[in-house]
Image (cartoon, helix red, strand yellow):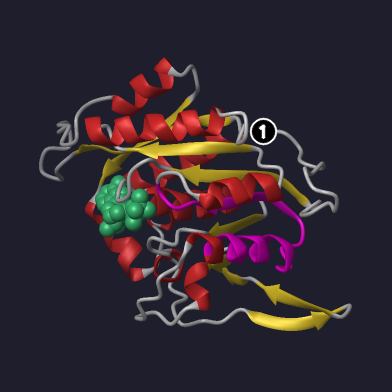
Amino acid sequence: TSNVTSTRGDTPLLPQVKNIIAIASGKGGVGKSTVSCNLAVALANLGAKVGLIDADIAGPSVPIMFNVEGEQPAVKQVDGKNTIYPIEQYGVKLMSIGFLTPADSAVVWRGPMASSALKQFISDVAWGELDYLLIDLPPGTSDIHLTMVQTIPVTGAVIVTTPQKVAIADATKGLTMFRQPQINVPVLGVVENMAYFTPDELPENKYYIFGKEGGQKLSEKFNVPFLGEIPIVQSIRESGDTGYPAVLKDGITREAFSKLAESVAR
Ligand code: ADP
């Protein structure tokens, strides 16, 4: 991945951020947020300086997945400007649409509101020097995608999908969107989540619950790298719910997400 110093706007935003990586999916529920959170922590474990923006208005997951629910980022006046300080957890700087709304409230985020929240996360947050700023996008295609590319120089997009036919069909749409002239963001590759399941009692067996190698075939079709596969593991779901990312635990989950981080960092 390359060094980002230029911007498409007049004022250079985020000049201290080397790589801005969008995490996208076609369909909801494929594990885009789970992958974003674990990838962020895995990159930090490799020694990188990492930030994560949760721009998923459909369901901001970062506050729960990082166990920082109910926390409020500090706001201070710096040079006459309101500056927001990201919340830091597990070595990752975090901003989430979820920090702006009470946890249980059913705020309906309209596209323009979400777009302006994302703009604020980019222009008013004291990110400091970062090697990677990950942006967890809402599923599908939306105003936010356009706002993002119009506001900051995105290094590339990572597409998360399950191997299932419907997920692949939607991921295909997501992938081609990034290649449209008005978006024009390089696709860094495809991650296949929920690739297979291995029961503890049968460690040699792989069950392809959502189908086999759909993500791999997608990456071949579009000639983009296959970044890796993440199996279905109960502790990945549990760690999401308890706010302690699976990559911090020993075993198969740490291995899978660390490998993913290495291929993204390459
Ligand atoms: P999305 O962001 O695409 O909507 P989430 O990351 O919220 O998806 O994941 C949807 C659900 O699936 C969550 O309950 C999450 O804990 C679970 N999940 C995601 N990936 C895995 C996995 N590899 N193994 C087990 N559960 C997973």
Residue denoted by label 1: 1
Residue 257 seen in the figure? yes
Quadrant for residue 122, please give it.
Answer: bottom right
Task: From the viewer's perspective, tell me whether residue 203 is left or right of residue 260.
Answer: left
What residue lies at 62% left-to-right and 51% top-to-bottom? 147
Q: Is residue 228 located in the magenta-colored stretch of the structure?
A: no
Provide residue 233's location: percent of width, then percent of height.
25, 49
Q: Amino acid at mark 1?
A: Thr
Q: Indicate left or right for 175 with 81 as reference.
A: left
Residue 259 shown left or right of residue 198 in the figure: right
For the residue labelled by badge 1, is the local secondary structure a helix, a strand or a loop? loop
Give residue 231's quadrant in the image: top left
Which residue occupies the foreground of this view, 10 or 36?
A: 10
Total numbered badges shown on the rendered structure: 1
Is residue 115 within the magenta segment?
yes
Percent x, y of residue 65: 40, 65
Q: Position of residue 208 (x, y in %)?
A: 17, 32
Write down the region rendered in magenta. 114-139
